[in-house]
Amino acid sequence: MDEQEPDYRFTLANERTLLAWMRTALALLAAGVGAVEFLPQPDAGWLRTAAGVALGLLSVVASVGGVLRWHAVQRAMRRGQPLPVFRLAWVFAAALAAVGLAVSAMLLLTDA
C-alpha cells in the first residue's frame, strides 16, 4: 500500500500520546511498589501482594498497549486510512477500576 509522510504535527501529537501512556505505565508501576510496601497488612497478606502485582501488570498493559496504539495510528495516518478503534482503553479502565475497588475495600476492612 502507498504510504505518505503525514503532517508532522499529527506525528508529534501521536508521540505525545505514546509518552502519556508511558507516564501512566510508570505511575502504575510505582503504585504497585507502593501498594506492596505501604498498604496496611490485612489478615490475608496476599491481598496486598495481589494489589501490587495487579498494578504492575496494568503497567505492562499500558506500556505495550501504548506502543501498539502508536504504531497503528502512525500506519493509518501514513496510509490515509481512518484511525483504528482503541478497545484496550475499556479493558484498561475496567481493570484499573477493579484494582481500585479491591484496594479501597482492603483499606476499609483493615481500618475497621
Image (spheres, grey):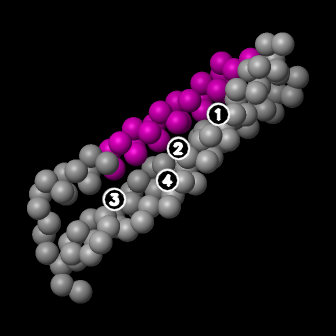
Report the Cα–Cα distance between label 1 and label 2.
Answer: 14 Å
Residue type at mark 3?
Answer: Trp
Indicate which disc residue 70 carries. Answer: 3
Q: Earlier in the sequence, mark 1 or mark 4?
A: 4
> Label 2 crowding class (10 Å Cα cut-off): few <14, some 14-19, many 20+?
many
Q: Spatial distance from mark 3 to mark 2, Cα to Cα?
A: 16 Å
Kind of element beneath mark 4: helix
Q: CA distance from mark 1 to mark 4?
A: 16 Å
Can you identify the residue that label 1 sits on? Answer: 100
Give the residues drawn in magenta, as a range: 18-40
* Residue at 32% over, 44% down: 19
> Is residue 24 depicted above or below 44 in this figure?
below
10 is higher (above) or lower (below) than 112: below
Q: Earlier in the sequence, mark 1 or mark 2?
A: 2
**Is residue 3 covered in magenta?**
no
Q: Are marks 1 and 2 in contact (CB under 8 Å)?
A: no
| Mark 4 surroundings within 10 Å by alpha-carbon count, few (fewer than 14), some (14 through 19), many (20 or more) | few
Q: Nearer the viewer, residue 32 or 111?
A: 111
Q: What residue type is disc 1 on?
A: Gly
* Residue position for label 4: 89
Name the amino acid, label 4.
Ala
Q: What element does badge 3 sit on?
A: helix
